């Protein structure tokens, strides 16, 4: 599955990917192993976890060299999911992707409660006692809100503004409009109209 439709309809993911690309360019300006480069790589490592999910084996295999006219390799085409910093310590990456997705959903629909989002994205808190006295896992509203605050703090530190609900709707509408144009063009091809 291509990530392009998802990226195009989620402005926050777009901003995260752009910022990671900017930081990668800054990191390339410093020598490998330098203090400045390590600091930038640490920032990239934190930020990229909130973008798209980690690449699977299929994504990692789909790398292609980019060759110029003379046959010299000048670059590499790879999945947008590929990580600049391979592994970070801490909670698994899928939880950070869920935090970002919950934050986007909260932005696009402010009436949704954090409790509802915690249940939807399967955030759990510590064991609590149920009415009959047994232990049970409760929806992790507190954990999700705490993670969302840390995510917003990281975005502020990186200079990324949260998109508004209007921006989210506009991105989705623009994507659907482009799909409609492509579908219309495909339906006219049998008649010889391009």
Image (cartoon, rainbow, N blue to C red):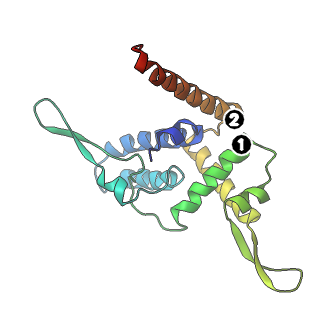
- Extreme-front residue of the structure: 191
Image height check: is 41 above or below 171?
A: below
The residue at the point 54 percent across, 61 percent down is: 94
Q: Residues within 10 Å of mark 1 (few under 14, many from 20)?
A: some
Asked if marks 1 and 2 touch (Cβ < 8 Å), the reply is yes
Can residue 151 be seen in this snapshot? no
Task: State the mark number for residue 107.
Answer: 1
Mark 1 or mark 2, earlier in chain: 1
- Extreme-left residue of the structure: 70
Give the total of numbered labels.
Answer: 2
Q: Secondary structure at mark 1?
A: helix
The percent position of residue 101, horizontal first and vertical second, equals 62, 50
The percent position of residue 59, horizontal first and vertical second, equals 36, 53
Q: Report the Cα–Cα distance between label 1 and label 2.
A: 7 Å
- Extreme-top residue of the structure: 193
Q: Secondary structure at mark 2?
A: loop
User: Label 2, on which residue?
Assistant: 164
The residue at the point 65 percent across, 35 percent down is: 168
Q: Is residue 161 left or right of residue 165?
A: left
Residue 22, image quadrant: top left
């Amino acid at each position: 599955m291509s990530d392009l439709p998802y990226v195009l309809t989620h402005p926050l993911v777009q901003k995260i990917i752009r910022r990671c690309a900017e930081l990668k360019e800054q990191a390339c300006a410093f020598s490998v192993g330098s203090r400045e480069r390590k600091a930038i790589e640490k920032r990239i490592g934190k930020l990229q976890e909130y973008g798209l999910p980690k690449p699977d084996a299929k994504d990692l295999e789909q790398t292609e060299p980019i060759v110029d006219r003379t046959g010299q390799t000048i670059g590499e085409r790879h999945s947008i999911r590929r990580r600049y910093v391979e592994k970070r310590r801490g909670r698994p990456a899928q939880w950070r992707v869920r935090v970002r997705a919950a934050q986007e959903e909260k932005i696009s629909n402010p009436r949704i409660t954090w409790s509802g989002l915690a249940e939807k994205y399967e955030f759990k808190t510590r064991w609590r006692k149920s009415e009959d006295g047994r232990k049970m896992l409760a929806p992790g509203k507190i954990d999700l809100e705490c993670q969302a605050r840390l995510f917003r703090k990281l975005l502020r530190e990186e200079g990324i503004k949260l998109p508004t609900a209007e921006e989210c709707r506009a991105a989705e509408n623009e994507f659907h409009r482009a799909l409609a144009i492509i579908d219309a063009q495909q339906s006219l091809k049998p008649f010889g109209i391009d």
